[in-house]
């Protein structure tokens, strides 16, 4: 295989770039996880994770990818036949709903007219009033497939104003450590997260933060489970039921938290917003008045700061452009998921990033548009630079 | 915390020492796993894993620890109410049986009079004749808790001579890549394995090899499942349902297979036997005729070549000796699990090991026996050296 | 110190970006360098280095930086009082001449009217005719301080047409592995190189390739020397007099050669030209007709493909812009050396690079020009993209 | 090449085992060494090095191996024709004397009757009285070739009692960071050290600590020099004349000092003594009364705590035993240097070591003695364990 020189610009919305200091922290020999040194590290790492989640409650950790954490959260909180409300935002919310159905839950969906628009919060209230027996509301904070966010305090308010007792379950996989998220303050009941996005770790661990209210509900759940069983985990010293612990991941997590807190969690969030806006300036320039690629999201208050989905004009395949970017310029972007395949390119801008990394990515995409003959307004990178120079 | 100098001698029976070249292979930036480079690597790595398993059949891989693979294997092959026969060999076989019960399976156990003796293979035949409805036989090839092996061809024969159709499920977690194991030749139906033992990788991946017969049975299983669902996985390009793929693990696996095949799988097995025998010579010398620590296993044909369990004399706590070895000499050994706590020390000798590593471990243990006033015959290390010099 | 996020864009003309696979190859435990494994590696690595040098002759390697290699080459080839001709190209040629003087050599310089213009090759011939006793001609293939190259075949021809026997000594530190260089074909007598530029290794090793003619001259050199003595080295098995061998460097070198040959040496050279031209397009756009920063080099046939020196307009300090690029955008560029301090910015574009890395660097520089109020034509990055998209 | 499993036990007296945390600290991308972050690191690292040297004076650092530091120290302190007194202790003191001669120094040697005995300190006084014009005394603190130490305060006293002004130059390459060494308190004038021994770093840097008195003498030295010139270095911001700085080495050095100070410099010295004594107990047992291998050093007050040289009985080749240890057991030991070739095996026990590493090494050597039929008293490892258990 021919050599691609230089660093791959990894602008997929996840996994994300892993800082060298995290990779090195994880590159270490096997140690005895029953030794005091590991216990200290574990507590440091998990304590840090809670600060990033902004919770003082329980967090259960799994040797699993994000899908495992989804499943864990469902099987610990519900019983077969329970009804859950799903806030449809795209491919990932669909997936979670499908999983719930597999475990015998009944699902009801609230959705916008199409994926390019955000669900009205009032629709959540309305749906809950219709089905007061709903036990949970499932939503995705940041839908990686469409580059759209939910305002979680608004979701919370929507549930409250329906007078519902339903638990609020949130997938924070592509928002945690990138966008503002406050587990305790916002009244979240269960937050699903993974290692490989804003925490800048390799894939391999996922987790659920759980509210006191949710822990009470858990006690009466009758779902069969073992690998993901929170009750089993609370009996264990490391409060994580994984059999053998992936110790390296916790060395990585401790370093991740150190990096995040060195920059400051607020600083991290501000930087993500700044870089995201740079990307959006470029995309808007490409749209121009020539029918070029445009922002997929049509609800301005839902634009994601961790991933931007770009809708391609009819007749042009986003995957062809992605292929050029990857093969000619060593820049990896995300494609359209599910029914958006070929229509959408997604640029991830979360994790360990800076301005020149964004500009390099945008430059490669702009060159690939040109090479593929996709109509577009010129000067996207210029527009991003204009904004980023000012914002610096 | 005070600095422990030098390398920790990691003689726990798992996880095991990770060779530097595997750590380095895994220490790499995030790459696009949809890129052709990763697909090539994935196929190389999984192809190698199959050669180590000695199978040409299906292997399903999970982002999970070994417990996840146990669960995956149960939920894909059985339906609630099914009866499975459990061959009791120690703490891990107990654990698997308990898990089966959680998922609504009925379990029946065949056991030896106590854990220090091996189950008679004829007892398996007898039990299956009594319960011809049994759908599976669960057994642990190498019971890490007691340092005892099963002869799997004898188990296969025992099932066959009962005229039973039950699937043979085997936990190979602490045997694969260390002891002889032949999936296809021995008529295994499902083999559960993990990354962190004989494959010399970090904890984080586990897998099940599945026979054609088992795949047929899978089709009629009614257990609720998603994260571990083989049917879902077969639809995916990487034939592993994990959401985001832990790419680093496959770089590690490819290197692991390279190392194993450089030595030769037979060479690996021979070396494990040689080093294990060295350890046993030392233990037998410690036993002496002074009532010193002795081999836990009383059935000579069941002695494990990957882990040796050592029973301590009454009145002496194995954990005190382990603590000395760890704190004074930076040597980590395993303790007694479950009801064997405090009575047993386990020396793992699997994975990336050589003679001086074994001698250093035995030396630290012998010094720790002395420091703790545990009666023992002197010259254990000498006896190991005597044997290992000759065997070299 | 505040955290700079993302990767530092290292666009200094040296050292250069080290590919991850080289870093990992070097990250390994100490091994016995008298063992056969190392001997094999050493030969592989040095064999590869010779192919990169395009020589079949002798190469002597030092644990030293490039300055050590300069010194080694002088003390092995000359005797106190010898006259050497120095082709002045900038700060580095000056440095080498000053070093020669310290060791008692007499130096004579040929220069262009100023550093922005290339020396006429005919001037070399003329100078040698005036001083037929000259024993050597010292020149720098690629002057890192000014971003200007020499055409070495023209230098060789200039020496020959003077009928001179002088040895041709060339500093290839910032050209080898980036620009075309042919030791044997071009009649070079001694080539000085270092690990940390086109070979993409850390600083720490340097070397001299030596022609048969030069080896003969070496035999009569009377300079005191030991650490760098080629005669001592030829007695040693590893033909490199360094006392203890820095083994890691050879693991790195073997990987470096593997990467270079995977791309192909010609491919490496072509890529350097392409990326360099992209940088020049940007600089020419910045110059515009507004008196912006401009290419330092005024002789078009001397433009370097591994480093571009940019002259700032009067009244604007290049170091202020460099500071902005480093502190706000984590992009490191080179400053003016010696008398060019504050007047020049140097962008290194050698080693392990690709298009988006170049665009990210140019983008950060363009934003920094803007932030510092340096007059410049807009659209430098655009111009680079225009070219690079076409050249891709 | 067949795979050697497990870690290589590196018991050569140098280079030494590099702790993983040092390797990882060095495994990092190129950074801008003119950036403030590096300056801070450099100062931290060099400050720590001075504490290890126990000096508050000047330290000059070279990108060079130990031989470079020897040369640097000579060419900065003397002028052609100067007389230096050499305290002969073995192969390395011979080498340094030979180097001095190459640079035009006159050398005079004081020696014991043979290398197995230590030089009388009174002989140094006597020699200096005979040659009051001597400008320097060259000695090797710990002669790696013979495993013998000098008591430096006694050397200092010997010089003082001769009323000599000669500078005291000491090679601390295999003692610094392992044996007690106090530059300021002991009145040393120049101490030569390297990265790859007690500092546990890769080969690649060496240095000289210099007293105020020596700096004055330096001012009048007329030796030609450049790469190693202290006067040039004092002009530079990093006070180290190396051209490009090997930045990775300073990340490693900072980590090395951190590890040393975590254990405590006194703790490091005590541990080296303890492990060395364990090795000596083994060797004395091998000697037995059967004419087995014995301690090379016959002067008990000169036994080195960082390396043990073992003399083999007539008719038995030490290299054959070393070959067995390396090939069969992956243990690397040192051979006899110069005229001791084939007669001596050297076990290095300096740097990052612990008890099981020593026992594993001794075990491999004892097995190799047996395999090669070398007569020896059995139970060497046992004797080491007896001592180490008590000393723990």
Image: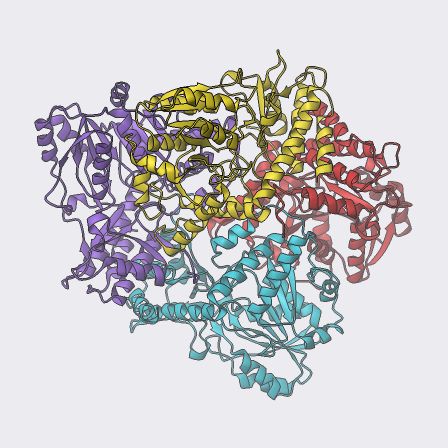
Chain colours: A cyan, B red, C purple, D yellow
Question: Based on the displayed image, in which of its 4 quarters is residue D105 positioned?
Answer: top left
Question: Based on the displayed image, in which of its 4 quarters is residue C98 positioned?
Answer: top left
Instruction: Tell whether D199 sits left or right of C274.
Output: right
Nearer to the camera, B389 or D241: D241
Residue D73, given in percent of the width and then of the height, sits at 38, 32
Which residue sits at x=37%, y=66%? A315
Residue D365, given in percent of the width and then of the height, sits at 65, 25
Give the vertical position of D173 relative to A139 (above or below): above
- Asked if residue B136 can be seen in this view, the reply is no
Instruction: Tell whether D119 sits left or right of B169.
Output: left
Specify the quadrant that holds the C terminus of chain B: top right
Give the vertical position of B310 relative to C392 (above or below): above
Residue D297, given in percent of the width and then of the height, sits at 59, 22
Nearer to the camera, B214 or B1: B1
- Asked if residue C27 can be seen in this view, the reply is yes
Give the vertical position of C40 relative to D317 (above or below): below
Question: Based on the displayed image, in which of its 4 quarters is residue A277 positioned?
Answer: bottom left
């Amino acid at each position: 295989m021919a050599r691609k020189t230089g660093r791959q610009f990894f602008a997929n919305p996840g996994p994300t770039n892993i800082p060298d200091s995290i990779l090195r922290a994880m590159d270490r020999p096997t140690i005895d996880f029953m030794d005091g040194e590991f216990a200290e590290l574990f507590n440091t790492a998990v304590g840090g994770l809670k600060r990033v989640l902004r919770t003082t409650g329980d967090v259960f950790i799994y040797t699993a990818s994000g899908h495992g954490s989804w499943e864990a959260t469902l099987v610990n909180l519900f019983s077969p036949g329970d009804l859950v409300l799903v806030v449809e935002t795209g491919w990932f919310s669909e997936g979670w709903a499908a999983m719930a159905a597999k475990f015998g839950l009944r699902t009801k969906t609230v959705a916008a007219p199409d994926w390019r628009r955000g669900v009205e919060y009032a629709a959540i209230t309305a749906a809950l009033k219709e089905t007061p027996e709903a036990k949970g509301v499932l939503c995705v904070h940041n839908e990686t497939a469409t580059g759209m966010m939910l305002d979680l305090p608004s979701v919370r308010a929507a549930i409250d104003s329906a007078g519902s007792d339903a638990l609020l379950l949130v997938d924070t996989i592509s928002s945690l450590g990138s966008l503002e998220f406050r587990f305790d303050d916002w009244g979240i009941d269960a937050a699903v997260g993974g290692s490989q996005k804003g925490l800048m770790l390799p894939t391999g661990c996922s987790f659920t933060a759980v509210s006191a209210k949710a822990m009470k509900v858990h006690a009466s759940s009758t779902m069969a489970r073992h690998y993901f069983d929170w009750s089993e985990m609370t009996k264990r010293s490391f409060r994580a039921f994984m059999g053998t612990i992936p110790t390296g991941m916790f060395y990585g997590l401790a370093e991740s938290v150190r990096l995040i807190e060195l920059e400051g969690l607020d600083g991290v969030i501000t930087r993500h917003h700044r870089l995201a806006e740079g990307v959006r300036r470029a995309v808007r320039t490409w749209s121009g008045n020539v029918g070029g690629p445009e922002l997929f999201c049509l609800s301005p208050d839902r634009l994601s700061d961790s991933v931007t989905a770009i809708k391609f004009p009819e007749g042009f395949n986003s995957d062809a452009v992605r292929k050029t970017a990857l093969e000619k310029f060593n820049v990896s972007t995300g494609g359209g998921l599910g029914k958006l395949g070929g229509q959408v390119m997604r640029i991830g801008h979360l994790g360990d990033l800076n301005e020149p990394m964004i500009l390099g990515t945008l430059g490669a995409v702009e060159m690939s548009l040109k090479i593929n003959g996709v109509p577009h307004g010129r000067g996207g990178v210029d527009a991003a630079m204009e904004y980023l120079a000012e914002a610096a």
